[in-house]
Image (cartoon, helix red, strand yellow):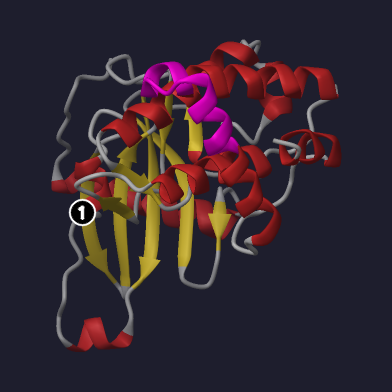
Amino acid sequence: MYADQITISDETVRSLVCLHNANILNGNYIRKLAKRQVSRVSQDGLSYIVKAYKISWWKRLLFAQPGKPAGDALLKGFTPECVGIISQHGWHYTIYQDAGAHSMLDIQGMLAANLELEECFQAAGSVLAMIHKRNLYHVDTKPPNFVVNTNLKFLPRVVVVDCDRVLSYANLPFRRRAFNLAQFISGGKPFPEIGMQLQCLEAFLVSYGKTAGIQNGDLTELLSSAMGMARSNKRIEKRAPKEILDKYWRF
């Protein structure tokens, strides 16, 4: 059972890091890049996500010890807790509670797990709106960074992850809201049926607007700006099928 906050011993942290390193060697990882690794590990009936970052030479030279990403604290209540940190052998490890195995890019996996897609998309729209109501901007709100929460009872149905870069504003700019919407809509892979995808995106947008307290006309203006960004900004991934992009580009 998960609690609102948990602490794990230094011994457990080291044990989880060993399990993570074994995953990397055995090819059992979520992500493996030259300077970043991510895997899922389990111990004593609990599941964790371990993220490892290669420490740059100048930080090692200065004996700099990275701390918790600031975004984790800003997004408390919307993202899994970081429960352990350690640096060793040129790598910095952060250990998180594991919310669940399915991101909102993994539509086939969600269907196989009998998750209700429309409910999950509504929850994603709501959590993004609540983040925006805090005047926070998560730099990367593409679907892989929205995870369906099946483990952590104290967090929303859908949580956000990869909170390394989160910006706080006195008043969140319109363009930041639009950019986040563009990332989510444009970054989704095709569903088995295009009608199902349109229905889920409508649920996402309606939930976002309702939670954010945005009127229909203002939401249409926001969506129009978002899809203009999706069309022109090369930093926004375009995984969505052409039918989806064509529909929203008409706004």
Vertical relation: 140 (above or below) 197: below
Pick the residue in front: 21 or 121: 121
Query: Visible in this render: residue 59?
Result: yes
Query: Visible in this render: residue 83?
Result: no
Describe the element under mark 1 as helix, strand or loop.
loop
Left or right: 235 in relation to 166: right
Task: Where is residue 56? Give x, y as percent.
Answer: 33, 81
Task: Where is residue 119? Give x, y as percent.
Answer: 56, 11
Left or right: 243 in relation to 72: right
Taking the magenta stretch, the answer to whether it contains residue 218 is yes
Pick the residue in front: 48 or 135: 135
Task: Where is residue 217? Give x, y as percent.
Answer: 53, 25
Q: Which residue is found at the position 85% from the left and 22% from the top?
A: 193
Dominant SS in magenta: helix
Magenta segment boundaries in residue numbering: 209-223
- Answer with the quarter of the image where residue 89 lies: bottom left
The residue tagged 1 is: 68
- Answer with the quarter of the image where residue 224 lies: top right
